Image (cartoon, helix red, strand yellow):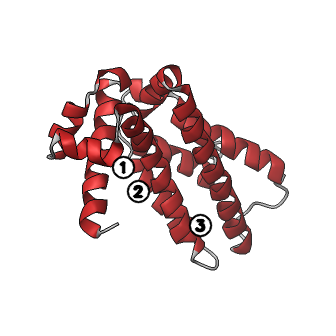
Amino acid sequence: MPAIERTTRARILDAARDLLVSRGVRRVSMDDVAEAAGVTRMTVYRYFGDRDSLVEQAFLFMAESLEAALADIARQPQPDVDAFLDRIGAMVGTLPAGLPTAMDELRKTHPEIHAEVRGRERRAIGELFERLYAGAEAQGRLRPGLKRPVVEMLFWEVVTGFFDYPALQAQGLSPTEVFRTIVDVLLNGMLVAAPRRR
């Protein structure tokens, strides 16, 4: 695909994703997407054929971003844990506000698309854990005595919970703030040392 076509496709998908998340899956038309992307309605149809295909590709586009970041990290022999977390944080910062609510609506309106998106996310999250754990192990960053299955279970709960809790955004927390707090707790724990008694 020529570069200009990739750019046009990405622009349409970015516009569709933002509209689907901000307005809701049911309330976005092909005309809305064309206007937001700065292209004609026919251009949107040429790339995606119909509305369901556009909805599917817009949500899968987010999974592709995660997969692309992983592919980039995979090229490094032993990824640095801090750089790895920074890269994930940068990616999280690009997620549109309201994504958990939009994913819930997608589950109700297009269950097959939701299942495909979730499947790809889960594969990517599994690979994220493997790389993060291996990098932390190689760098001697894991605390002695931690049980890997427990760490993995907590990682899954935190990461999948992060994507599934619209209540966090309802409290005014951005995806970046949530991610930074999660990383801070992972790296530094939750409690400070108890004050010394006199």
The kind of residue on which mark 2 rests is: Ala
Where does residue 21 sit, x and y in percent of width and height? 35, 32
Q: Mark 3 and mark 2 in contact (Cβ < 8 Å)?
A: no
Residue 198 seen in the current view? no
Residue under label 1, please give it.
Answer: 94
Percent position of residue 88, x then y: 49, 57
Q: Position of residue 156 (x, y in %)?
A: 67, 43
Disc 3 secondary structure class: helix
Q: Return the mark for residue 81.
A: 3
Give the mark nearer the N terminus: 2 vs 3: 3
Please report the residue visible at 20 percent of the width from the left and 32 percent of the height from the top.
32
From the viewer's perspective, tell me whether residue 114 is left or right of residue 14: right
Q: CA distance from mark 1 to mark 3?
A: 20 Å
* Closer to viewer: mark 2 or mark 3: 2
Question: Residue 176 versus residue 71: which sits nearer the camera?
Answer: 71
Which residue: 42% across, 28% down?
102
How many angstroms separate mark 2 from mark 3 (CA)?
A: 14 Å
The residues bearing labels 1 and 2 have C-alpha atoms spaced at a distance of: 7 Å
Q: Which kind of residue does numbered mark 3 sit on?
A: Val
Residue 90 marker: 2
Contact flag, marks 1 and 2 (Cβ < 8 Å) = yes
Q: Count the marks.
A: 3
Q: Residue at x 16, y 46 (%)?
A: 39
Please name whichever residue, 194 or 79, is drawn nearer the observer in this view of the structure: 79
Q: Quadrant of the N terminus?
A: bottom left
